[in-house]
Each structure stands twice: as structure tokens, then as C-alpha cells.
Image (cartoon, coloured by chain):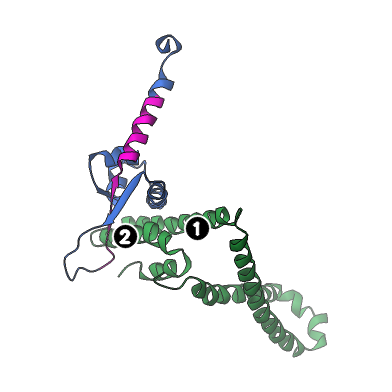
Chain colours: A green, B blue
Amino acid sequence: MRGTRLATLSHRLLHPETHTLIMVPALADLQFESRTATRVRLARAYTGVARAFAGAVLFDAARDLRLSIGNAEWRASRREDVSTFGGLVLVQAVYYLAMLGIAAGALEPSDVTTGFLFDNMLTVGLLLGATIVLPVVTTAVCFWGGRRPAGH
Amino acid sequence: MILDLLDRGERFGLEMIELSGGALKRGSIYVTLGRMEAKGFVTSRQEERHPGAIGLPRRLYKATPYGLKVRAAYQLLREALALKPAEAQ
């Protein structure tokens, strides 16, 4: 069935009512259209659903921001969420950095002087980028799902 | 425009996109409809389905009496603003 993965992602990340009111109708129409649509039309439909998803994320963010104004309790709970999220990211990032450190230790000093690192700046940059991106993604998937359980 | 299309009864989102002739886009219509529903301009319900139907149920939208009043007020305002100064007096 088309759009199942996006439906799961949206169910996990968005507020339940946003998922029901914005993403479910968009995906239902995509599934309906996919029975008869040509490839071009289907690609356009997928783009539309992706844009609807982006819009739904913004819709949720705007609502969260509105809620945060003048609601001390809500702000306090979010602050707790942010610190937990940051802590989980940090633990993983330190682990990845330690692994990188061990790998770098295996290099000979001459590798640096002969320009090994400079010749491989792209690789080094990608590895450093991964130490930031990977923890954020894994924490978002595990932690966010816990904050917005399915069916609520 | 959405309220104009819903004036004649219930419609699916995709139907409105097609009827609008390109004025409504797939990426924005569902977000707009969601916002309109939150504001009470439209209501929606899931389509009735046959047992064993596959896929997600589609959603049908209908304008509320409040939504139609807002639309009428907006049209009135638009007409008033379109009047030439001499006609307005």
C-alpha cells in the first residue's frame, strides 16, 4: 500500500489530531489516486503529500509555540524534554567521538605530515558530521516516539 | 475558494484540487482544511466504506453554517471595496 511508511512516520512524529486531520486525508487521496494515476501524476501526488507533511510539521510547531506562551507548566515540561534529548545526543556523540579518536590513534604521525588528513578532508568532515547527525536522528526516533505514543 | 467549492455539498480534498483548476495545490489544501476545521469553518467525516476495502479511509469536507456566513461576509466586504467612490456614496 502506497504511503504506508510516511503514514507511520507521521503517526509517530505529529500530534494525533494533526496526523488525523492533515496527513490521513492526504495519504488516503494518494492511495485512491494511485489506482489509476500515471507515473507523472503519481510523482506529483507524492510531492504534494511530502509538502503536506512539511506543512503539518510547521502546523504542530506553530501550535507548540503558541502553547508555550503563557503556559509555565507546559514550558517546564518542554525544558525537561529538551534537556533529556540533549543528554541522549551528547552521550552518543561522545561515544562516536571516542571511536573516531581510537581510529585516529591508529594513524602514523607521518600520515599527518604527509598530508593524509588534508587529502581526506571530505572523509574527515563526513565522519565528524555523522557524529552529530547520527545521535540526533536515533534520539529523535526513539525519544519522540515515547513522547507521542501511538493511538493517543 | 474552498468555501465556494463546498457551497454545493460535501467534497473530497482531491476533488476540490481538480475543480479549482490549479488554484488549490495538493501540498497546501490539507493543511488549509485542517486549519479551517480547527476554526470551525468546515467539518469533515470519514467516507463510508465497504467491508474489506483496502487503504486509508478518505475524508469528506462540508462547510459549516458559520463558514458560509464568513464567506458571505467576505464577499460583501470584497464587493464594498470594489465599489468606485461615487457608487459607494
User: Where residue B41 sits: x, y (%)?
Assistant: 36, 43
Q: Quadrant of residue B57?
A: bottom left
Residue placed at 29% from the left, 63% from the top? A31
**Is B57 a magenta residue?**
yes
> Is the same chain shared between marks 1 and 2?
yes
In the rendered structure, which amino acid carries the disc numbered 1?
Asp
Q: Does the magenta segment cover residue A31?
A: no
Within 10 Å of the Cα at label 1, are there few (<14), some (14-19), or many (20+) other Cα atoms?
some
Q: Residue at x 37, y 46 (%)?
A: B40
Quick check: A51 left or right of B1? right
Name the chain letter of the residue that bears numbered label 1: A
Q: Position of residue B17 (x, y in %)?
A: 32, 46
Whether the residues at callouts 1 and 2 have beta carbons within 8 Å, the answer is: no
Residue A124 lies, in percent from the top left, at 70, 76
Look at the numbered disc 1 and give the secondary structure of its residue: helix
Q: Secondary structure at mark 2?
A: helix
**Is residue A136 in view from this perspective?**
yes
Residue in view at x 70 percent, y 84 percent: A100
Amino acid type of the residue that numbered disc 2 sits on in the rendered structure: Leu
Q: Which residue is mark 2?
A: A30
> Magenta stretch?
B55-78
- Quadrant hosting residue B66: top left
Of callouts 1 and 2, which one flags the residue occurring earlier in the amino acid sequence?
Answer: 2
Instruction: For label 2, count other residues whose C-alpha is less than 10 Å away and answer few (under 14), some (14-19) or many (20+).
Output: many
Q: Residue A83, image x and y in percent?
A: 66, 71
Left or right: where does residue A14 sit relative to residue B45?
right
Q: Which residue is mark 1?
A: A60
